[in-house]
Image (cartoon, rainbow, N blue to C red):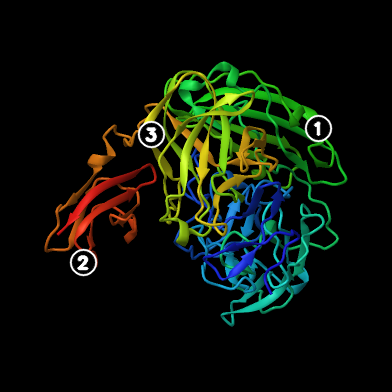
Amino acid sequence: MAKKSNTIFKYTFSFIPACFLPLTLVSQEYTLPLFTNINYYTFPSLTQGTPFYSSKTLSTSIALPFFDDFHYAYKQAYPDVSKWQDSSVYINYGYAKYPISFGVATFDGLNKKGYPYQTIISSTASEPADTLTSRSINLFVNGSYTYTPSDSIALVFYYQRMGNGDNPETNDSLILDFFMPAQNKWKNIIWSITGSNIAPVNDSAFNKIHIYITDTAFLYDGFKFRFRNKATPVGAVDHWHIDYIQLDKNLYKTDTIIDDVAFYYMSSPLLKNYSAMPYKHFLPSEMAVQVNNYMKNNNKYTTKNVNYQFNIYDSNGNFLYNYNGGSANVNPGSNTVTVHQKPSFSYTFSPSDTTRFYAKHFLNTVPDTWNLNDTIVQCTALKNYFAYDDGQAELGYYLKFYGTQLAQRYTLNVTDTLRAMDIFFIPVNSINISNKDIFRICVWSNFSGQPGTLIYRDSLMKPKFLDWGYNQIPRYYLTAPLVLSPGTYFFGIQSYPPSSQYSVTIGLDVNYNHSDNTYYNSIGVWNQSTVKGSLMMHPVLGDSTKALGINESGISLQNDFILYPNPIETSKILHIQTNINDPYKIQIFNSLGQSVLIQSYLQHSTDINISSINPGIYIVQIITKYSVLNKKLLVK
């Protein structure tokens, strides 16, 4: 029996012998779970310091208390290495609904690089997927004190099923195990919860779990605990979210108060209309005059007095501006004080080139159990592209019909040149469509607030799927640059799926809602989108170095990759010479556009054996995180 959902429409993914249901069916618009995750990248932050994720495991046991609420989700997609020894869960701030505090650990069917554990599996299968394992913890002594079963040592955590993601069904589960150091083995299923074929009525609820540790088999130095899930391991499906994990002594089930005020979502951008825009188009009128904050008083009985401020810094960390909202009483619950929820401010960026600005929001509450979740940092990019989304996709958005047009509205403040589009296509059916020319980049004029005349339509293109960790959104260059005068335009695509079983699916950020700027045309009439969120589809403009295929040093990327010998005759070893340090991918296409060789995870200069390739003319495609380059190769 196929996995079930609470919708009435079934959609088939041909790269697995199974049927999954879309999460939403609104008119001709559909959403579905992600089958990859682009969000595993290094988050820009004011201080880069030591990364939270590391491939090394620290050997020293840590002492009680143990606590993590994943407050660092704004700058890192992996668990904190000082607390955790593996990295397959996704640390984020978008998938959960109303978390206890900012940031959660999300369990799904993707590995630590954001790709499916398996691609060929039945939809009824539920297999081991993500694991979150603590570092070794000393439950034997703390200083001169020796722990005993009477110390009320307990593990406390909160979990949510589904949230903004996909509902785990009855054959999916979230499991907790404990490690017995003296026996050097795990005791499995200390606690577990299964999903349901019926989506939760309250998908924003977090459930508290309190487990006493009284068995002396655990009271040793080297104790560990781990969470793991069973899911259909084909993508970002079957979601569980964990927050506010605490391990300590003297934790009682009668302790029902969390005396903590915290942020729980990212604040709104400092730009009025966008999350990012080209620096040349920035005007003082583009600044927001108000910030939307999301803070929660988790103490359900007591009003807390909270001071709120935010600072703005430039890309070098230099202080630029301070807003001081002073102190105000915050009642129990979420967003219960207007003065801090929507503060007005007056500041204007002064960019002279591409740059980033950072807003550091922080709270001060006394007393407060945990103060690290009182600070979040938001980045505003003034680069060479427009964007509405927050850089994190939670769902995929698609339209089914052949020739469907999809567009987003942007306003140019100066004459500029459209060079490319950054589009995050979800690799649903990627085996079948990645080698097919199935979409065109299009630009429409503005007619009474919706797409009007088609003023540009490019040649057919293939979707690209970058398959290494720390993925970036692929960039698609126009055949010819398009000069545009100031005004409002609609940038998007027209898709040509080869049959009704395929779709062109784009990443959807559900936290920033700009659906009023998204339009689709499936049957000859433009309609405003009714699906809340922002599509990850960014027009790239200007003479920016990256838009033109130029590296940070101003040298053409075409010169950064040299292929030799060319023509290649007898050696069958293709040498790639480059000074690029970032990872890149090589894909070779024959004259029919068919892929004949793929090499991923390449770095620096390298050699590729092409003995399996027949004589002929080929295109060697080099994919970096900034550009896609094509070079001709003659094999004799």
Q: Disc 3, disc 2: CB below 8 Å?
A: no
| Element assignment for label 2 | loop
Task: Characterize the local packing of mark 2: few (<14), some (14-19) or many (20 or more) Cα atoms within 10 angstroms.
Answer: few
Q: Which residue is mark 2?
A: 611
Which callout, 1 or 3, points at the residue further toward the start of the chain? Answer: 1
Q: Of the numbered discs in the image, which one, if any, rests on residue 337?
A: 1
Q: Nearer the viewer, residue 25 or 560?
A: 25
Q: Amino acid at mark 3?
A: Ala
Residue 282 in the image: state x and y as whole percent: 52, 21
- In-image side of 592 versus 355 (left or right): left
Q: Of the numbered discs in the image, which one, if any, rests on residue 547?
A: 3
Which callout, 3 or 2, points at the residue further toward the start of the chain? Answer: 3
Which image quadrant for residue 301? top right
Query: Could you tell me which quadrant the C terminus lies in?
Result: bottom left
Which callout, 1 or 2, points at the residue further toward the start of the chain? Answer: 1
Q: Nearer the viewer, residue 25 or 404?
A: 404
Q: Nearer the viewer, residue 374 or 483?
A: 483
The answer to whether one can see residue 159 in this image is no
Task: Give the CA separation, mark 3 to mark 2.
Answer: 35 Å
Query: Could you tell me which quadrant the N terminus lies in?
Result: bottom right
- In-image side of 419 versus 223 (left or right): left
- Residue at image position (47%, 19%) is 485
Residue 594 in the image: state x and y as whole percent: 34, 58
Q: Amino acid at mark 1?
A: Val
Q: Nearer the viewer, mark 1 or mark 3?
A: 3
